[in-house]
Amino acid sequence: MKKALRHIADYVKNLDKAMLALCAIMSVFSVFLLYTMNVSGISAQVTGRQWRINALAAAVGIAAAMVISAIDYKFIARIWFVYAPITLILVLLLFTPLGRGVEGADDIGWLNLGFMQFQPSELLKIAFILTFAAHLSKVGSRLNEPLNMLLLCAHGAVPVFIIMKQGDDGSALVFISIFLIMLFAAGISWQYIIAALIAVPALIWFAWNYLMQPYQIKRIQILWDTQMQQDEILGIYMQQYLGKKALGSGGIMGLGLFGSDNYTYVPELDTDFIFSYIGMTLGFVGCLLTAVMLAVICLKCLSVASAAKDTLGRLICIGVFAVFFSHSIINIGMDLGVMPVIGIPLPLISAGGTSVISMYAAAGLVMSVYSHRHKAEHMFYSEKND
């Protein structure tokens, strides 16, 4: 009994309370925003269901993060053969009748199990961070050997290829970001970086002319083609146009949260364009504070990475940083009109239970690295067993 109490006290003492508090604050903000959307009646798509799901997902996510933080990240990485195949199978099930899309979306990203539906690609991101961090940690100083680099690229290509076949361009871009940022942090040679930069123009030309679908090209072209924007104001550009209009309509302090005659209707306001809602209701100040909070979470990941006791822990934190950073940049970029609309949620804020829980699971991994940065014996795992 005394030993159990000592472990619990030790766990609480070493818990990364700052990371947990930052994520919880964002969830409270999210639930509040979704609640005000429902009350104001800005969109028939936004009901009381969204804020209730996010509140429940946040509660589940907090519990998951606390449990994950109590388990040594080395043990979690070591049992990759349990969760990696499961997440891959779940994603592959999207290509069966169990997979379904959302109205207006181009991908089949939701797995319908009858009693529930969720996005398995969000879980795959967590599995990829762990497996890729373990792979990079294992090769260590031999990272830049051609064979190891080839195997690492194959490791990164698997989820990207599957997600692209699924049609989820946004998640594929996030996987590419995780892969590149983790590879850079692991110490990839500048020779590879320079070679990649030289090859990029040719790869872009090839993808543009032979791989990308017409609608994908159009989504990118419309970002700078003002004539196309005018021609498509009621077509493909409508959502982004309304999002930018809503974002700018709030001015410095916003129009208020509980209803206004000047609100701008934007499709998917609770998910892809929730940053536009923040700008419309809370103004530039609200957008700035939101961006600052997301930046602080990203910096917290990097801070824990710098204090990690080994390469594995450092790379896991870098991978989680890459998820929060890429999601934030892509989502805010969509709302600002500098990125194509590719369906990426704003971390911990956009409506969506799977996304919220996966972000908390990712935060839990950072918390695990923080909690186990010094100790040799932990609540659920002991290094003496190594």
Image (cartoon, grey):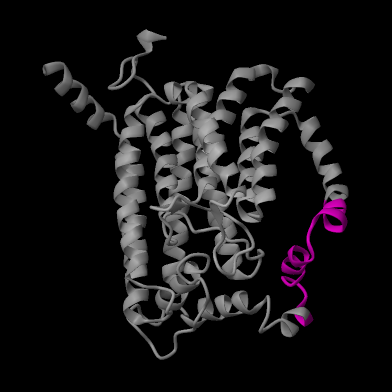
Q: Position of residue 363 (x, y in %)?
A: 41, 41
Q: Nearer the viewer, residue 182 or 302?
A: 182
Q: Residue at x 60, y 76 (%)?
A: 239
The answer to whether residue 145 shows anywhere in this view is: no
Above or below, comparing residue 383 to residue 23 in the picture: above
Front position in the image: 274 or 54: 54
Percent x, y for residue 164? 68, 49
Taking the image as drawn, is residue 266 in sight?
yes
Q: Residue at x 70, y 37 (%)?
A: 157
Residue at point 85%, 50% (across, down) = 201
Magenta segment, which residues?
A: 204-227
x, y percent for residue 112: 48, 53
Which image quarter is the N terminus in?
Answer: top left
Return the residue nearer the eye: 272 or 45.
45
Q: Is residue 219 on the magenta stretch?
A: yes
The chief SS type of the magenta part is helix
- The answer to whether 61 appears left or right of 304 in the picture is left
Nearer to us in this view, 351 or 280: 351
Spot the residue most to the bottom. 261
| Residue 2 lies in quadrant | top left
The C terminus - image quarter: top left
Where residue 305 sits: x, y (%)?
48, 32
